[in-house]
Structures are given as C-alpha cells and as structure tokens.
Image (spheres, helix red, strand yellow):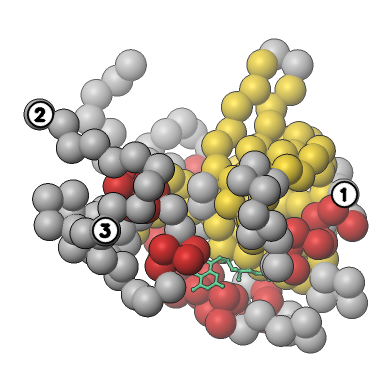
C-alpha cells in the first residue's frame, strides 16, 4: 500500500519549525530526496567574494556541452543578483569537514561581508568566468550564466542554468571515484522526511556516499 500526498497541504503535517511550510513545499518533505551539497561563489557588487551554500540541483550534458541546473535559488540572495550581473559563477564541492564553515557564511551574510573570510576559505580567480572559487574545494565547476526562470511564479526562488566552462579537480581526488565517494568526498543533504503516518517532522540530515556495487 502506498501513502498518497497531493498538491493540497495535508492538515496532519506538522512543521519542523514555524515557517517551514512558508519556505518549502510539503511535497518536498514527503519525498525527501537526497541531493549534493555545494557552494555557489560569485562577486558582490562591491567586489567582495560571496558564498552561497546550496543543494536542489543536477548536472547533465551531451557530447557538445555540460550544464549545471540549479533549482531553488532564492531571488533575494546576493548570488541571484551577482550571477546575472557578472554572467558567471563557480560551484564548489567540499567535504563534510567544511560543513560548519559553509553554514557560517549563511549567518554572516551582509553586503559588506567578505563571505570567504567568514567561512575561513581562500579565494582564487576563475579563469573562464568572472567569479571567485574556493581553493579548498576538491571539485570546482566554472559556469557561464545561461538563464533564470521562476517556475512557480511566486517570486520566491528560481531555476538557474549555467554552462560548465572548466572543471578543476584536486589531484588527490583525481584517480577515480575512491576519495569522492567516502567521508572526504561529496556531501549530501537529506531533507527532513515527514513521517507520513503521523505527520510528525524529522530533522534534515547530512550524508556522505558509500558505494554498494558497480554498474
Ligand atoms: C543546508 C542549507 C541550509 C540553509 N539554511 C538557510 C537558512 O537558515 N536561512 C537562509 O536564509 N538560507 C539558508 N540556506 C540558503 C542559502 O545558503 C542562503 O540563503 C545563502 O546564505 C544566501 O547567500 P547570499 O545572499 O550571500 O547569496 C541554506 C542552504 C542550505 C544548502
């Protein structure tokens, strides 16, 4: 038997914090799909480097190009403005050990804040786009901005697409999947999965990868 959840908010769903369902759809907490965590880096208007911790994205391509499809980017963020103004951004993949420092950049988020300094990160200049990247990342994607679309039309967040112009991989991660799929590799956000039987919330979690078999 499957539990069904539709577009109408189920009355028995309890939020994990008061504004949860002002920010997120109940369909997101009902499905709770894990996704890669990374940081989007850009230049602020005043030239300071900016960090935005992010998830809700995917990456795909064909033989002619590779694209970053960033979902759920808040329209009120520096990042949304910066990446359209400078027409570029970098995506930085860091290990779990950087989690607290990335969260620090959410709390220290002023117009005059150097968010690399706030997180204790070292800035490097991208070569193919007008954006900084985090030197401590094990993987960096330099992306040119393609388009932004407000899928729901609510003016809250946007779907942003970028074309990957250059990939940088730290040498110790370059020999295949081993280090990328382990405690020092990709970090994933596991959204707080609603208990669909009682409506109780659960806390969101951070995961790393464990390879179970080969394809
Ligand atoms: C795991 C995670 C937690 C986040 N928590 C918050 C939060 O508590 N408040 C918030 O406004 N944005 C949160 N965000 C979204 C952005 O990281 C945040 O808006 C960002 O600091 C915007 O930066 P900017 O204005 O410098 O672009 C979170 C993102 C992730 C991936």
For the residues labelled 2 and 3, the Cα–Cα distance comes to 21 Å
Which is more toward the observer, 133 or 109? 109
Please tell me which residue is depicted at 55% across the width and 57% down the height of the picture: 54
- Ligand 1 within 8 angstroms of badge 2 C-beta: no
Left-right relation of 99 to 76: left
Where residue 87 is drawn, which disc sits there? 1
Please rate how many residues cluster around mark 3, counting C-alpha atoms within 10 Å: few if below 14, some from 14 to 19, many from 20.
Answer: few
Residue 114 position (above or below residue 141):
below
Q: Is mark 1 within 8 Å of ligand 1?
A: no
Name the foreground residue: 193 vs 67: 193
Residue 65, image x, y percentages: 74, 23
The tag on residue 5 is none
The residue that mark 2 highlights is 1
> In front: 187, or 168?
187
Which structural element holds mark 1? loop
Quadrant where ligand 1 appears: bottom right
Tell me which label, 2 or 3, sits earlier in the chain. Answer: 2
Q: CA distance from mark 1 to mark 2?
A: 48 Å
Position of residue 62 measured from the top left corner of the image (x, y, whole percent): 66, 16
Find numbered disc 2 in the image and state the secondary structure of the residue it sits on: loop
| Left/right of residue 24 with respect to residue 129 in the rendered view | left
Foreground disc of the pair 2, 3: 3
Q: CA distance from mark 3 to mark 1?
A: 43 Å
Q: Residue at x 75, y 59 (%)?
A: 80
How many numbered circles does the render carry? 3
Does residue 188 show up? no
Q: Which residue is mark 3?
A: 11
Q: Nearer the viewer, mark 1 or mark 2?
A: 2
- For image coordinates 69% across by 27% down, the residue present is 66
Circle 3 SS class: loop
Asked which quadrant contains residue 99, the reply is bottom left
């Amino acid at each position: 038997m499957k539990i069904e959840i539709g577009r109408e908010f189920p009355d028995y769903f309890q939020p994990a914090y008061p504004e949860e369902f002002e920010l997120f759809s109940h369909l997101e907490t009902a499905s709770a799909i894990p996704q890669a965590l990374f940081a989007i880096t850009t230049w602020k208007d005043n030239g300071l480097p900016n960090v935005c911790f992010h998830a809700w994205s995917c990456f795909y391509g064909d033989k002619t190009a590779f694209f970053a499809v960033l979902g759920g980017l808040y329209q009120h963020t520096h990042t949304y403005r910066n990446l359209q103004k400078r027409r570029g951004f970098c995506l930085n993949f860091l290990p779990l050990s950087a989690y607290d420092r990335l969260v620090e950049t959410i709390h220290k988020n002023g117009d005059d804040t150097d968010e690399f300094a706030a997180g204790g990160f070292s800035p490097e200049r991208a070569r193919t786009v007008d954006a900084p990247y985090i030197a401590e990342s094990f993987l960096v994607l330099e992306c040119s901005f393609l388009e932004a679309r407000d899928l729901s039309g609510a003016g809250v967040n946007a779907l942003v697409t970028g074309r990957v112009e250059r990939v940088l991989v730290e040498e110790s991660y370059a020999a295949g999947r081993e280090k990328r799929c382990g405690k020092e590799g990709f970090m994933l956000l596991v959204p707080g999965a609603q208990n669909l039987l009682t409506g109780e919330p659960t806390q969101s979690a951070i995961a790393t990868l464990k390879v179970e078999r080969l394809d």
